[in-house]
Amino acid sequence: MEQPTLFLLVLCLALGAHGLSVEKCNLTGRWKNDLGSNMTISAVDEKGNFTGSYNTSVADTPNKIQLSPLVGFQHLTNPIGQPTFGFTVNWTFSDSITVFTGQCFVDKNGKEVLKTMWLLRSRVDNIENDWKATRVGTNEFTRLEPQ
Ligand code: BTN
């Protein structure tokens, strides 16, 4: 084989392999975040819907923290790799709701990590207090046990 042809063949193989490699990242399972909160996400269905439960380690209420339900969507791309997602937690022990949006990444060590941003809405007694009803932040989740 001529040298330029060989070079092109190697180049195509390298580019092809890179283009086809899809970093798989699966939301299903048990996760822990940087605050020490835990959550469990059930199987994601064929439309990207999922449900789960959230056990927060912190709360802005004197009430006893209780396990709270979550519902969400994973964005289904084809092929599925490092997908975006969003979910809502309906706190059962507090008059507040938190929405999370994020992306599932595979880090340089091959570990899955969920990078999220959240928006929490607390109930306030009147519209004059609306200004203090929302908080935002970020959370990073790592898997509690390997899949
Ligand atoms: C409340 O305080 O009214 C309900 C609990 C809110 C917990 C928040 S949600 C965002 C942040 N991440 C967590 O894991 N817990 C806090």
Image: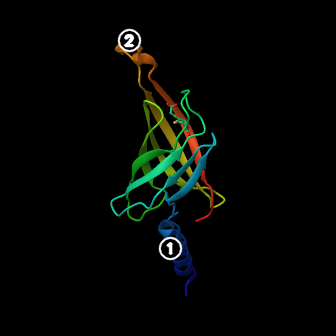
Of all residues, the one furthest to the right in this rendering is: 109
Estimate the x, y position of residue 48 in percent, counting from the top left.
Answer: 37, 57
Q: Say which residue label 2 marks.
A: 128
Packing grade of label 1 (10 A; few <14, some 14-19, many >=20) is few
Q: Say which residue label 1 marks.
A: 12
Mark found first going from the N terminus, 1 or 2 = 1
Label 2 residue SS: helix
Of all residues, the one furthest to the top in this rendering is: 128
Q: Residue at the spot x=51%, y=46% of the render?
A: 54
Q: Relative to 84, is 59 above or below?
A: above
Q: Relative to 134, is 13 above or below?
A: below
Q: Locate residue 74: give its quadrant.
A: bottom left
* Nearer to the camera, 20 or 116: 116
Estimate the x, y position of residue 29 in percent, counting from the top left.
Answer: 53, 59
Q: Is residue 17 left or right of residue 144?
A: left
Label 1 residue SS: helix
Specify the amino acid type for callout 2.
Glu
Quadrant, the N terminus: bottom right
Packing grade of label 2 (10 A; few <14, some 14-19, many >=20) is few
- For marks 1 and 2, give the CA distance: 63 Å
Q: Relative to 118, is 147 above or below?
A: below
Estimate the x, y position of residue 139 in percent, counting from the top left.
Answer: 57, 40
The answer to whether the residues at label 1 and label 2 have Cβ atoms under 8 Å apart is no
Quadrant, the C terminus: bottom right
Specify the amino acid type for callout 1.
Cys
